[in-house]
Image: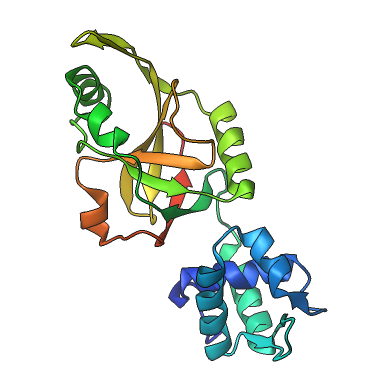
Amino acid sequence: MELMADRMDPFVTYLIVTLALLGATKRPVKVTELGKHMGVSRATLSRWVSRAEELGFIKVSSKKVQFILLSDKALDFLLSLKESLEGVEWGEVVIMGEVFSGMGEGAYYMSRKGYSSAFAKMIGYEPYPGTLNLRVSAEDTRKIDDWRRRVMPKVVQGFSEEGRTFGEVEVYPVKINSEIEAYSIFPRRRHYGFDVLEIIHKENLRKLLGLKDGDFIAITLKNWS
């Protein structure tokens, strides 16, 4: 087909697939219903909807309560996506995470020698002293829970430093935007809820990827190779 899935905006793809799962190939779907399932802010959803409408993938009602219906172009795209996925080896799950500024604890803890030296032995380098913080939807939180049940973590042991005790940290492999190998950490003493991923890498990921608060990135939940 002329329209190839690999040339599509990933966020528009996410929008189209979610609408299809909600039945928008056959019936109009309320924008509010779509927002609940996608787990993104109203402003972000509005941008994605506007972009998809501009590209001709959806039809949006102009009434006070907005409804969305997938267009024939979207149906063609879904068919091309289905064809592109044939033969794919499944096993790794991809989720979406929204970048947000944390409380500064990541930088503090990652700068502790007990952690940085242990990470260097485990993953081959001392991580940048800070974490990339990502907030995920309720649906993706469940995927993370399932992933952590299936994949055995590597564990950085707790230690004492400067009169303080620092707890164990579970480490799992991830990939950012299908290209950057990184790691997700889960301190046993968590400061965030389970809807947050903390990502570590040898470089400052915000600068490396040009990220700002509110941006979305794709995270592949991997197994140890």
**Residue 30 sits in quarter:** bottom right
Question: Between 64 and 122, which is closer to the camera in this rendering?
Answer: 64
Q: Looking at the image, which is closer to me, 88 or 47? A: 47
**In-front residue for pair 191/153:** 191
Apparent side of residue 109 relative to residue 3 in the rendered image (left or right)? left
Would residue 29 appear left or right of 150 to someone viewing this image?
right
Quadrant including the C terminus = top left
Does 36 appear above or below 9?
above
Q: Position of residue 49 (x, y in %)?
A: 57, 79
Name the residue at 26% across, 50% down: 205
Q: How is the image coloured?
A: rainbow
Location of residue 14 by image quarter: bottom right
Q: Judge whether residue 219 can be spotted in this image.
A: yes
| Quadrant in which the N terminus is drawn | bottom right
Q: Position of residue 81 (x, y in %)?
A: 59, 71
Residue drawn at x 52%, y 44% is: 92
Q: Is residue 26 above or below residue 182?
A: below
Q: Residue furthest right?
A: 27
Front-most of residues 225 and 8? 8
Residue at image coords 60%, 76%: 80
Above or below 217: residue 123: above
**Residue at image x 52%, y 51%?**
95
